[in-house]
Amino acid sequence: MRLILRALGHARIAWSGAVLLLLALAAAAAPGVAALIGADGDRVDLYQRLAPPSLAHPLGTDELGRDLLLRLLDGGRVSLLVGIAAALAAAGIGTMVGLGAGYRGGRLDAALMRLTDGIIALPLLPLLVVLAAIDLKKLGLPGWAVQSEAASLYRIIALVALVGWTTVARLVRGATLSLRAQDFVRAAVALGASPLRVMLVHILPNLASPVIVATTLSVGHIILLESVLSYLGLGIEPPLPSWGNMLTGAQETIGLAPQLALYPGLLIFLTVIACNFLGDGLQDALDPRARRR
Amino acid sequence: MTRFILLRLLQVLAVLAVMSFIIYALIGLMPGDPINLMLASDPHLTAADVARLKALQGLDQPLLKRYLAWAQAALAGNFGYSRLYATTAIAALAPRLANTALLMGVSFALSLVIALPLGAMAARRPAGALDTAANLLSFAGISVPPFWLALVLILVFAVALGWLPAGGIATIGDGGFLDRARHLALPVTVLTLASIGGYLRYMRASMIEALRQDYIRTARAKGAGEARVLWGHALRNALVPVITVVALSFGSLFSGALITETMFAYPGMGKLIYDAILGNDFNLALAGLLFATLLVLLSNLAADIAYAAADPRITYR
């Protein structure tokens, strides 16, 4: 029994990775396949509203008669793109903050970590709702940039990255603190390497595993956050589909077509849990001290 | 200790002051403005009227000046008038603050009562059956989109089975204890499941660490029973790092409350803030965000004080 469970623990990385890869591939291949068979996820067919599953529409259609399966795949592309792009941006900010704080120490460290803890402790969702509602034109951005279809995509990536870097920063700071005291770093300092060089050339490569783990975990977290904001109508704006905004309309038609409410949420759940398992598994694999006994 | 609490209270005030400025500036960047809203309701206003109104309301002043005027009024307890609720912002806010405190308090207590013992017991046999089950529960809890969980629960318990109400806070004309409890059941379930995972994982990790210490071996060697070792010796030490995590979690608890309240039409602060922002009710959104921040900061402070109670080694100066 114990052995089986342990084997499952190791298999976790494999299967969660496989699930994610499969989802990503399906979402990436969707437009190509759809074009090949002559289908289109954006095509409205008002005679086929809320249709039950059929051969032409394997999962049925939504409230505008669009094919649910194609919409799900398109939405997945958006959700995964936001998750990965924002997680990478957040990892970049977090690594810089953590590296600076951990290496410099002293006042800078205290100030940056106060800031990090402060951000973690704040009620972020209400603040994100305000940030998402901001009129970018009042910030002096040109109208064409605000009106374009991709604007909501870039905006949400920027917003989420702005608050998502804290986990990475804390982990990187911790790892930097212990690396800073090690002999190879002190040797580099003794040889006259500049602080920037020590940080970037000698410490940064050794931070790979905490950064990879934290980034993987935050992809899941960010996809969740994007879905919440899109659901509330403040994230990805229709007609561009995301798993979150597909659920917005589904609440009203839940009695007629419960599948509309079920599948997008199920896909978010599956993706996020796979990211979390992958991150947790990677942590066990990359950090021998944290390995469960 | 008193000195520590006073210092932390000062800190809370400082953070609140900074946040109030940031929020004030952000609200000013939201689409539309109060004068435009007045214009929409009265087409007879001329450009001269608009300029006069702007000057009257102080909207032609620079941001810092406007903020200081607002802060001065706010300090005197005047947060302005709510457009949506046609009453003062404070009067719209007060009852909702209590509702949210109830929802958050019950969910918080419930998730601790489940997560801490479960995490402690799971730590006894890592990778055992209980640990695996607890692990699955916590991963499911942190991975499920809360608004979707709420949708599914409404679908099952309110629509299909008809056991529980789909939303609101009380049946009109009832409002007894049992009625309130029935309305709280689903929102509390969603919020509890969303916050249980984090606590559970930290408790488990911290307990595993504690059980590896020398004093546990000593306790076992002197013949203490398993229950005494676990609950008497290990638990209290394992709790200390968990409390820091709990202290930082009130912000996300409030975020969860915003989603839960919106889904279940529960008249709380989260839904109020969301409605105020979407409805261009600037005064109310501002006051709501500020009180939410205050609620979270004070909860953090309470957790910091609990830290001292759990770990007598910590002295506050």
Image: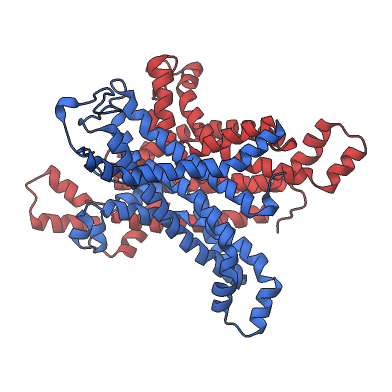
Q: Tell me if residue B82 can be seen.
A: no
Q: Which quarter of the picture shows residue A227?
A: top left
Note whether B117 is above or below A230 in the view shown: above
Q: Say whether residue A33 is left or right of residue B213.
A: left
Tell me the blue chain. A
Give the letter of the red chain: B
Which residue is at 30% across, 46% downward? Answer: A236
B276 on left or right of B192: left
Give x and y (percent) for residue B103. 49, 32
Query: Residue B307 at x, y = what percent?
Result: 68, 47
Left or right position of B280 against B24: left
Q: Tell me which corner region of the image, top left, top right, bottom left or bottom right, holds residue B124.
A: top right
Q: What residue is at 30 percent from the left and 52 percent from the top?
A: A153
Q: Colour scheme used in the picture? A: by chain
Marker count (numbered): 0
| Above or below, comparing residue A143 to residue A244 in the picture | below
Residue A215 at what x, y percent from top left?
50, 54
B226 vs B108, nearest the viewer: B226
| Quadrant holding the C terminus of chain B | bottom right
